[in-house]
Image (cartoon, rainbow, N blue to C red):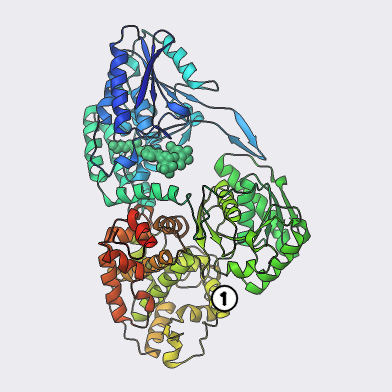
Amino acid sequence: MAQYRRVSGSVGLITLQNPPVNALSASVRQGIVDSVKRALGDQKVKSVVICGQNGVFCGGADIREFGRQMSGPPLVPMIHDIEAANKPVVAAIEGSALGGGLELALGCHYRISHSKAVVYHCFIMTMSDQAKLGLPEVTLGLLPAAGGTQRLPRLIGVPAALNLITTGRHVTAAEALQLGILDHVTEHNTVDVAVKFALSVTGESLDGRRISSFSCAPLSDLDSLFEEAMLKVRSAARGAIAPVACVQAVRAAATLPYAQGMEREKELMATLFHSGQARALQYFFFAQRAVGRWSTPSGARWDTSQPRPVRKAAVIGLGTMGRGITVALAQAGLSVVAVETHAKQLMEATKAVPSMLKRGAVRGGTTIEPDSITYSQNLQAVADVDLVIEAVFEDMALKEKVFQQLSIICKPDTLLCTNTSSLDVDHLASQTRHPELVVGMHFFAPAHVMKLLEVVYGRRSSPAAVATAMQLGKKMGKVSVAVGNCRGFAGNRMLKRYLEQAFFLLEEGATPELVDRALEEFGFPMGVFRMSDLSGLDVGWRVRKADGLADTSLTGTSARVRQGCRYSPLGDLLCEHGRFGQKTGRGWYQYDKPGGRVAKSDPWLHNFLDEYRARHGLVPRCIDQQEVLERCLFVLINEGFQILEEGIAAGPEDIDAIYVFGYGWPRHRGGPMFYADMVGLERVVERLERYHQAHPDVPYLQPSGLLRRLVANGSPPIHKWRNVIKNRNSQL
Ligand SMILES: CC/C=C/CC(=O)SCCNC(=O)CCNC(=O)[C@H](O)C(C)(C)COP(=O)(O)OP(=O)(O)OC[C@H]1O[C@@H](n2cnc3c(N)ncnc32)[C@H](O)[C@@H]1OP(=O)(O)O
């Protein structure tokens, strides 16, 4: 709803009231319509201010209303009536003005916002306490269809509007002022300043204040500007349709009169509003927030577990991961002790880390003070830290030793975290005096850039330890997802199945090019083989060797069988040929030099595959893209259901967040579990069963018990899966 009152004698003050972000629900829209009518009809009122309760102007349309029958007054005529008012209307923007919230402000005649001066946070300078403005509809699979695509280009010009609308990025009040979105920023109380301002413009002409009457600033080569913009969004969007529609809508603003532009905006929005991509992106908006409300099977929860303060942290091991983690911790404002026992590696890190910090600061528009990091070759240097993140080589014996030493050196209440990507967290905890203070913090490379953090709780991890790691992840700007301890945790455990299928497809007749094309057209930034070349084939090979799997001396049928199941030694064989991927200039593809980035098809590899198939009596067959997608994705999804069944992840949102933020799953497809829901659970079961019949030596193709139970329960929508997971006999 909206509250209306008269202040300072002649200003009608309308306050949006819908906590926490004053989203424009039906009752808020009705409240605005009624309040505006009242203000315009009251002769004592000479001007109007619109603001939001509790320091937030407006977070936009109420996203929860989208899937339902819309009721209440629509936004477009509401904003039109505000713009057409014959009394000045001022938007007082505190907190956020996003989406419909900014569109509402663009309908007002003036916009004033809040911006506070520079603040030094530890050693990083930030602009704090500023309002954020933006049109993020594209991130929800939509476009700003309450006049945003038509008013913003008229106000700030086509290039700047295209940038904001196609990326959905939020800008600070300072940038918004520079762009011309705002008329004024203040360090004082925004509403008070807006009321004073409203008094000062009482009676002034509003002719030059209605944005819909503006023309877009003329540009010399509009066609090439839009062609370029279209190329850019198409290459970045990887199949997402909303960014393309956004460009088309802005083009309408640049080329058509306002009324026709609004018609075009409406038409384009109609194509997006009920699309699967919009559903996926809106689901994902809430999924990201759901993962913050974590819980563990032992009953620990986000709202009852108190995190410990962490001011000083240590990183052990300054290889690629350790350096990235050091940077991420320093960027979060922590004081960091970075330990590396190898002198040469330490020396390299002391050069690399400051330059990574510098590059990050340039990107983020902040300044840095690298003195917050101290380097040491001696583990004793961690004696007084609050938390340690071990990032040494992925070798259990080595990690055991590090944990034993840490347990002696550190304060008794220091949290000990491991950045292992798959090893047993419980086993490491058992090496320490306080196993309740051990958790996994699984970062993804590059650790200072990638958003995902898997926080792995062990059998004995205390609620406070989990809460502390989750909160620290958040402080580092990560999406922290709590998962249970098992081989590979959630992400890598699912990935293993996906990789296996990709290898099997090569054995059966596919090429890396075919498999990668199918996955890239689906929306992954890189197919599985291009990705393995980038991350290095030797990483998995080392793990398989340690597990006793990578034995290429085996011949006959046993060469392709391990522990009674089908196994492909293709990756092992490539590594034996010294083909580790980009780093050696050869992998599944060839590169112009070691470290080269451009993957080229490699005739050697195709010959190698032919010979391999001939040696094993495999007759290559024609494999289409659909089979590639079904085999690779459905087996990964199936493992996801198994993970849910075992309680390793608490809900499908956790798995989806892991895959979107850590593994490049296209966000406009919502994540693997949401994708399964979209495809239809029955179909997923049917296809898995069919593939399992064809490949009985691949047990993971058998639909998981939970997947079958969900189908038996009538395939409920994804938000009801937790009920079935909780209750094994659920009929919902
Ligand atoms: C007719 C179609 C018209 C479309 C035009 C639109 O306006 S589309 C909507 C465009 N708006 C957005 O995309 C903004 C989305 N919100 C945010 O980016 C952030 O929430 C925020 C406003 C920057 C505030 O961030 P903060 O970190 O402070 O809080 P949370 O993100 O945790 O949000 C708090 C709770 O509020 C819920 N919520 C936020 N925005 C909306 C919204 N627009 N509609 C409905 N609900 C919203 C959010 O889900 C959180 O709820 P919890 O239950 O606490 O998880």
Which quadrant of the figure has residue 583? bottom right
The quadrant of the picture occupied by the C terminus is bottom left
Q: Is mark 1 within 8 Å of ligand 1?
A: no
Secondary structure beneath dot 1 equals helix
Q: Is residue 77 above or below residue 290?
A: above
- Residue 218 in view in this figure: no
Which quadrant of the figure has residue 610? bottom left
Name the spot of residue 17 as percent of width and height, x first.
Answer: 39, 28
Name the spot of residue 153 as percent of width and height, x first.
Answer: 35, 31
Name the spot of residue 391 as percent of width and height, x first.
Answer: 64, 62
Q: Is residue 59 left or right of residue 301?
A: left
Q: Residue at x 21, y 31 (%)?
A: 260
Q: How many marks?
A: 1
Q: What amino acid is labelled 1 in the image?
A: Arg
The quadrant of the picture occupied by the N terminus is top left
Residue in front for this viewpoint, 594 or 365: 365
Q: Is residue 380 above or below residue 700?
A: above
Residue in front for this viewpoint, 189 or 578: 189
**10 Å neighbourhood of mark 1: few (<14), some, or many (≥20)?**
some
Q: Is residue 360 left or right of residue 262?
A: right
- Residue 462 in view in this figure: yes
Q: Is residue 499 above or below residue 100?
A: below
Q: Residue at x 48, y 77 (%)?
A: 571
**Residue that badge 1 annotates:** 542
Residue in front for this viewpoint, 239 or 85: 85
Q: Quadrant of ligand 1?
A: top left
Residue furthest to the bottom in view is 556
Name the spot of residue 432 as percent of width and height, x first.
Answer: 69, 66
Which quadrant of the figure has residue 382? bottom right
